[in-house]
């Protein structure tokens, strides 16, 4: 095959042979070797050999994480190339497997009725059921998307907001172009409002904002997506959010060709910033490749 080098073939071969490791780390998780061995159910010796080979091929990254006063812990996470490859594979397979597959209307009605229950166990059962459905099947009618939006922004369901947003993310990943346009029309305005809302910054609210951004990165029309994801990333950066790295990874994975533009934007902002933000921007520039 013209233009397809042996190095690329070997890289793709290694990628396919180690999909279990990559899927555990996707999208932005990081683990020690011992943690990864438990999650993949591989023996530590076999895993270490695979990990060392993947590090040499730039499929994963080995870093040191400092916790407390002890020695830094070595952790493993995905490289940009693995993230992008797995995103393509996961997205394609998800859409193909969900093609013409819809949840049973009767089951959906029961789950949404259960969300109105005063019994917390019933609510959790409904969310678990809707989540499981959303990874494999889409909704047979748009009215269920409207109901889902209603529940996401129902203040009585605020403890479950993140889980409900995750359901939208699941649906977006198995949707075709027509359904993505519908998701965009129904959710974009309210999700943007949620992302930029002036709320108390906690781990929970920041995690919700990040999942909101992940949904927007799936459903927004391509002509508008870059500006929305970039502006959200810059907002998290200015706030010093702990999720700015996740937002950067998301932006870079969607638009690897825009890395230089992002760097120039960061440099421009740095010229008008205080020392704290300049320090954060310096770190971001170092992490952009």
Image (tube, helix red, strand yellow):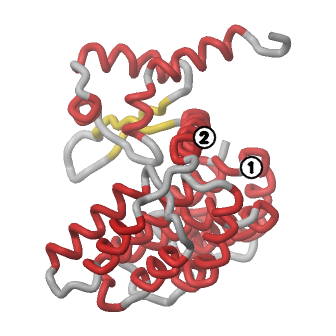
Residue 55 placement, left or right of 188: left
Which of the 4 image quadrants contains residue 265?
bottom right
Q: Residues within 10 Å of mark 2 (few under 14, many from 20)?
A: few
SS for callout 2: helix
Which of the 4 image quadrants contains residue 134?
bottom left
| Residue 171 in the image: above or below residue 155 | above
Find disc 2 in the rendering and name its residue: 92
Disc count in the image? Answer: 2
Q: Please, which residue is most extreme toward the right here?
A: 2
Q: Residues within 10 Å of mark 1 (few under 14, many from 20)?
A: some
Q: Closer to the camera: disc 2 or disc 1?
A: 2
Give percent across and percent down for residue 245. 52, 57
Which residue corresponds to the image point at 52% horizontal and 78% vertical from the top-left?
Answer: 143
Which residue corresponds to the image point at 43% horizontal and 59% vertical from the top-left?
Answer: 103
Residue 98 placement, left or right of 68: right
Give percent across and percent down for residue 154. 38, 89
Look at the image and tell me whether residue 276 can be seen. Answer: no
| Residue 77 in the image: above or below residue 47 | below
Give percent across and percent down for residue 26. 45, 43
> Along the polypeptide, which appears first: circle 2 or circle 1?
2
Residue 231 placement, left or right of 89: right
Q: Quadrant of the C terminus?
A: top right
SS for callout 1: helix
Which residue corresponds to the image point at 73% horizontal and 76% vertical from the top-left?
Answer: 272
Give percent across and percent down for residue 142. 56, 73
Disc 2 to disc 1, C-alpha distance:
25 Å
Q: Name the mark on residue 153.
A: none
Query: Dots 2 and 1: beta carbons under 8 Å?
Result: no
| Residue 138 in the image: above or below residue 94 | below
Look at the image and tell me whether residue 167 can be seen. Answer: yes
Residue toward you, 161 or 270: 161
Find disc 1 in the rendering and name its residue: 259
């Amino acid at each position: 095959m013209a233009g397809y080098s042996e190095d690329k073939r070997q890289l793709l071969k290694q990628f396919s042979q180690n999909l279990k490791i990559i899927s555990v780390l996707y999208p932005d998780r990081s683990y020690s070797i011992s943690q990864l061995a438990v999650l993949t159910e591989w023996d530590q010796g076999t895993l270490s050999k695979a990990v060392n080979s993947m590090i040499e091929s730039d499929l994963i990254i080995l870093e040191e994480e400092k916790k407390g006063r002890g020695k830094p812990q070595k952790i493993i996470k995905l490289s940009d190339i693995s993230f992008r490859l797995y995103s393509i594979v996961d997205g394609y397979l998800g859409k193909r497997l969900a093609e013409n597959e819809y949840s049973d209307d009767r089951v959906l009605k029961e789950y949404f009725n259960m969300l109105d229950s005063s019994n917390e166990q019933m609510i959790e059962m409904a969310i678990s059921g809707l989540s499981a459905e959303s990874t494999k099947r889409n909704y047979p009618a748009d009215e269920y998307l409207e109901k889902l939006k209603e529940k996401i922004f129902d203040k009585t369901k605020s403890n479950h907001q993140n889980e409900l947003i995750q359901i939208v993310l699941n649906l977006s990943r198995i949707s075709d172009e027509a359904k993505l346009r519908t998701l965009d029309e129904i959710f974009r305005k309210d999700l943007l409002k949620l992302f930029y809302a002036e709320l108390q910054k906690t781990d929970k609210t920041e995690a919700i904002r990040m999942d909101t951004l992940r949904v927007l990165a799936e459903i927004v029309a391509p002509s508008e997506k870059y500006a929305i994801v970039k502006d959200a990333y810059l907002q998290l950066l200015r706030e010093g959010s702990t999720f700015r790295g996740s937002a950067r990874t998301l932006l870079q994975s969607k638009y690897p060709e825009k890395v230089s533009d992002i760097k120039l934007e960061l440099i421009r902002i740095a010229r008008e910033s205080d020392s704290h933000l300049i320090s954060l921007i310096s770190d971001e520039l170092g992490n952009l490749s």
